[in-house]
Structure formats: C-alpha cells, structure tokens
Image (cartoon, helix red, strand yellow):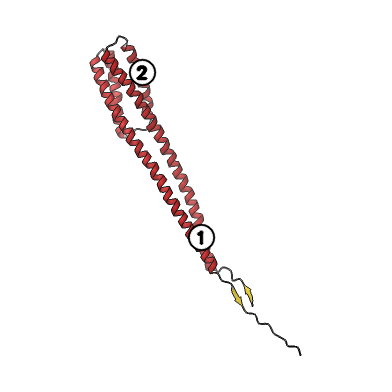
C-alpha cells in the first residue's frame, strides 16, 4: 500500500483563509482601538492636570489673597491701601490665567460673579468705601468655596472616566484572547480533519517456473 496526502480541499482552504483573515482583522481593530483609547486617556489626564489640578492651585492662591484682603479691611491699617492694591493686582493676574482654562457652565457663572466682586472691591477701595469692599470680599470667598467644590466633582468625573476606559480595555483584552483561542482551535480542527488518502496499488505478480 502506498500513502498519498490528500491536502486541503477548496472548502477547507476557504474556511482556513477566512479564520486567519479574521485574526488579522481582530489584531488590526485592536491596534486602532488601542490608539484611540490612548489618545482619549492622554486628553483626559491632561485635562485633569490643566483644568483641575492647576485651577485648584489658582483657587488656593485666590483664597489666601482674599483672606488677607478681608483681614486688612477689618484692621484699617494705614499701609492697607498699598498692600490691597498689590493683592488685587495679583488676583487680576491669576484670574486671567484661570479664564484660559476649560470652564463648565456652572464654573463660568460663578467665575463671572467672582470677577465682578473683584472689580467691586477695587472700586470700593478707590472710593474709600471699606464696608462695601469688605462685604464684597466675604462674598468672593464664598464663591471660591463653590468653585473649589466644583473642581472636586469635575476631577472625580474625569477620574471615573479614566477608570471606565481602563476597565473596558481590560474586558476587551480578555474577549480578544478568547476569540483568538477559539479561532486557533477551529483552524487546528480543520487541519486535523484533513485525512490522508490511502491508495491500493496492485502489482502484477509473475511466477517464475
């Protein structure tokens, strides 16, 4: 008996090619999806730093300045006007940088009120209306607390967004592994199902007398 390999049939070739192509497509889609997720992660992390951490530092500086302004207005010190003008100039500088960051609608409303109180304090000091300046300073401090709480909430949302993306990626990774394993098993099954063809060849036997 002689053994002759059968080889893949056309149907088996189509099945195998389709499965291999599926693996290649899965790898390509995974690569594209990872690139998009990395881009989103970079944008989100950058936003957390630039629009939340940095702004949180601005709010801290503004709070310290306004606490000092409030104390100076209450004390009635002769040196207060010069110091107040210096503090207000620093506040204006911080406000300019603050306004360049991303602001939610709620932040925009509160920040607009805050800057209005800053202007009111400056005008009240110039007109020697200490009581009005003190009242505006106290209101500005309240708004800073509101802005600070907004930063915490927005920062938490951004962090949840990052965690959500990483969790989604983790689930997709497990799914991809399962799919590749299943496809590999199917390819192996097709290969093993291809059996060799046994050919019987009868030879003429000659008996010599």
Residue 142: image location, x then y, percent = 27, 26
81 or 174, which is in the foreground?
174
Toward the right, the furthest residue is 209
Q: Which residue is mark 2?
A: 89
Residue 186: image location, x then y, percent = 49, 63
Taking the spot 34% from the left edge, 12% from the top edge, the residue there is: 82
Which of the 4 image quadrants contains residue 199? bottom right
Q: Is residue 162 above or below residue 30?
A: above
Toward the bottom, the furthest residue is 209
Look at the numbered discs 2 and 1 and tell me whether their residues touch, using CB distance below 8 Å. Answer: no
Q: What's the mark number on residue 184?
A: 1
The answer to whether residue 113 is left or right of residue 101 is: left
Instruction: Name the quadrant of the N terminus.
Output: bottom right
Q: Is residue 119 above or below residue 183?
A: above
Tell us which disc is closer to us: 2 or 1: 1
Query: Could you say whether the residue bearing mark 1 is in a helix, strand or loop?
Result: helix
The answer to whether residue 92 is left or right of residue 28 is: left
- Count the marks: how many? 2
Instruction: Name the quadrant of the C terminus.
Output: bottom right
Q: Is residue 10 above or below residue 126?
A: below
Q: What's the mark number on residue 93?
A: none
The earlier-in-sequence mark between 2 and 1 is 2
Query: Could you say whether the residue bearing mark 2 is in a helix, strand or loop?
Result: helix
């Amino acid at each position: 008996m002689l053994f002759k390999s059968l080889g893949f049939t056309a149907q088996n070739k189509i099945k195998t090619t389709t499965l291999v192509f599926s693996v290649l497509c899965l790898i390509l889609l995974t690569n594209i999806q990872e690139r998009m997720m990395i881009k989103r992660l970079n944008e989100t992390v950058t936003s957390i730093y630039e629009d939340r951490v940095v702004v949180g530092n601005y709010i801290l500086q503004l709070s310290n300045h306004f606490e000092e302004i409030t104390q100076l207005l209450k004390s009635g010190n002769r040196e207060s006007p010069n110091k107040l003008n210096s503090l207000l100039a620093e506040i204006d500088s911080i406000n300019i940088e603050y306004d360049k960051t991303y602001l939610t609608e709620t932040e925009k409303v509160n920040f607009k009120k805050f800057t209005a109180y800053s202007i009111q304090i400056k005008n009240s000091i110039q007109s020697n209306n200490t009581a009005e300046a003190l009242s505006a300073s106290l209101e500005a401090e309240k708004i800073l607390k509101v802005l600070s709480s907004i930063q915490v909430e927005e920062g938490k949302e951004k962090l949840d967004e990052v965690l959500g993306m990483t969790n989604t990626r983790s689930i997709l990774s497990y799914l991809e592994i399962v799919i590749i394993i299943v496809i590999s098993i199917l390819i192996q099954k097709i290969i093993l199902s291809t059996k060799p063809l046994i050919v019987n060849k009868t030879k003429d036997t000659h008996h010599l007398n």
